[in-house]
Amino acid sequence: MRRLTKDFYARDALTVARELIGCLFVHRTGEGISAVRLVETEAYRGPQDPGSHGYRGMTERTRVMFGPPGRLYVYFTYGMHWCANIVCGGEGVCEAVLLRAGEPVLGIDGMKQRRGCASPFLLAAGPARLAQAVGISREDNGASLLRGGSLWCAADEVTPRYGSGEIAETIRVGLGAGRGDDLPWRFLVPNNRHTSRRR
């Protein structure tokens, strides 16, 4: 599984979010390798995006979002869940892609144990589920996806990538009115059973 390069991530979040669809997100731990094929992502674009954690500028929490590209931004939500984002754009530019859902590919038994769930369609169907399934935690915040680390994204060389006509664009989920909830910055594979569910 060849890692995506820094050049892949050093572009705007909308481009990266779309092109991550069909790629593999991989985590190697002491328990082995876990990987999901990404089927749903969301783009977040800093000061032009009220839904972004970086909308009001850099803080200690959001420092990772401002680059360099090709790192993981991990945040805690609802007091119980971790979510994983990939930092993109140029250094100093706050852009990131939320990994919303994936199809389990490798290490599925380990995912079931971490999630306490047997259904393959619910293991990584949502950003918190995905992070838990592949073993993402606070310690992974700021981790590089480049140069031999334990986390990376790769083009899936077995399953052909989705063509542009196979990827839908829709509004993001769970932001609330006035927080960019009307922006069509969510990308997903329509009718794929591994995508997240809207409440």
Image: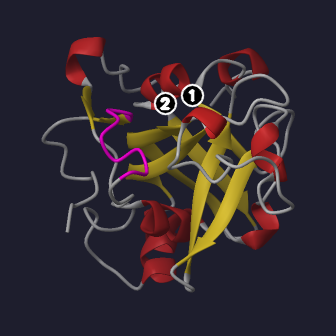
x and y percent of residue 154 in the render? Answer: 60, 30
Q: Determine the secondary structure under disc 1.
A: helix
For disc 2, the marked residue is 17
Quarter of the figure that contains the N terminus: top right
Q: To which quarter of the image does residue 59 belong?
A: bottom right
Q: Could you tell me if the residues under marks 2 and 1 are in contact, i.e. CB atoms within 8 Å? A: yes
Q: Nearer the viewer, mark 2 or mark 1?
A: 1
- Left/right placement of residue 140 relative to residue 41 reads right
Is-magenta flag for residue 182? yes
Residue at horizontal 61 percent and vertical 49 percent from the top:
85
Residue at horizontal 41 percent and vertical 31 percent from the top:
21
Is any atom of residue 143 visible in this view? no
For disc 1, the marked residue is 13
x and y percent of residue 189 in the render? Answer: 25, 35
Q: Which residues are magenta?
A: 178-185
Q: Nearer the viewer, residue 190 or 172?
A: 172
Count residues near mark 2 (Cα–Cα under 10 Å), then give few for <14, some for 14-19, many for 20+: many
Please, what is the three-letter code of the amino acid marked with disc 2?
Answer: Ala
- Left/right placement of residue 187 relative to residue 71 reads left
The colour scheme of the drawn protein is: secondary structure
In the rendered view, would you say 36 is above or below 47?
Answer: below
Is any atom of residue 68 visible in this view? yes
Count residues near mark 1 (Cα–Cα under 10 Å), then give few for <14, some for 14-19, many for 20+: many
x and y percent of residue 2 in the render? Answer: 67, 26
Please, what is the three-letter code of the amino acid marked with disc 1?
Answer: Ala
Secondary structure mostly seen in magenta is: loop
In the rendered view, would you say 145 is above or below 76?
Answer: above
Quarter of the figure that contains the C terminus: bottom left
Residue at horizontal 43 percent and vertical 68 percent from the top:
129
In the rendered view, would you say 43 is above or below 72?
Answer: above
Q: Determine the secondary structure under disc 2.
A: helix
x and y percent of residue 23 in the render? Answer: 48, 32
